[in-house]
Amino acid sequence: MKDNDHLSGLFWLAISLFVCIKSIDLKIGSFNSPGPGFLPFCGAFILGSLGIILLVKGIVSKKKGTEITLSLWKGRKLSNVIWISTSFFVYVLVLPKLGYLLATFGLLTFLFGIIEKTKIWVQVLSAIVAVVASHLIFYVWLGVRLPQGIFVF
């Protein structure tokens, strides 16, 4: 493996350690009564595990003398990555103002258009189904508070 794999493994391990420490500060809680740091801690733990796997895999393959080169961006459209990353940033900014329903509908419609490039009615219908389903699951059934924005219900 390239030395970049070692560096990226160490980088993700360091990020996961930082998030784990901050999650502990938020109080992790338990499986029966999770605290606000529970989900970030679990995600960071998984990320750290993958970082360790990448680091070990790089060390083992380097000792064997094999070099595996994978081009992550080969055949990919960099413009899609930029559009998608920007759309998530905008989503976070407009979520409190527009509310969960409108902001998520707009995000999903946009993402379905960028990724799939389907007809507009398919994008809109898919976004409606996804937003309604997630609203039912999280807000109605699980009782999770979602940003209301301009809607009061």
Image: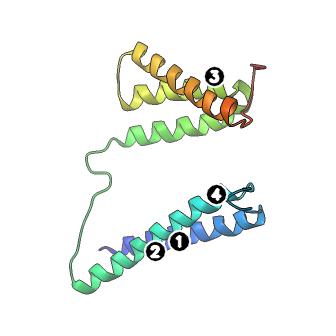
- Of the residues shown, which amino acid type is indicated by label 1? Leu
The percent position of residue 79, horizontal first and vertical second, equals 39, 38
Q: Amino acid at mark 2?
A: Ile
Residue 13's disc is 1
Q: From the top left corner, tell me how far across and down residue 28 is, in percent.
A: 72, 62
Query: In this picture, is 120 found above or below 88?
Result: above
Give the residue number, with chain letter if any, for mark 3: 102
Q: Element at badge 1?
A: helix
Task: Give the vertical position of 56 relative to 141 (above or below).
Answer: below
Q: Residue at x 35, y 21 (%)?
A: 118
Dividing the picture into quadrants, the one containing residue 87 is top right
Decide if residue 119 is on the left or right side of residue 75: right
Disc on the earlier residue, 4 or 2: 4
Whichever of labels 3 and 4 marks the residue nearer the N terminus, that label is: 4
Q: Position of residue 141 (x, y in %)?
A: 66, 32
Q: Which mark is residue 40?
A: 4
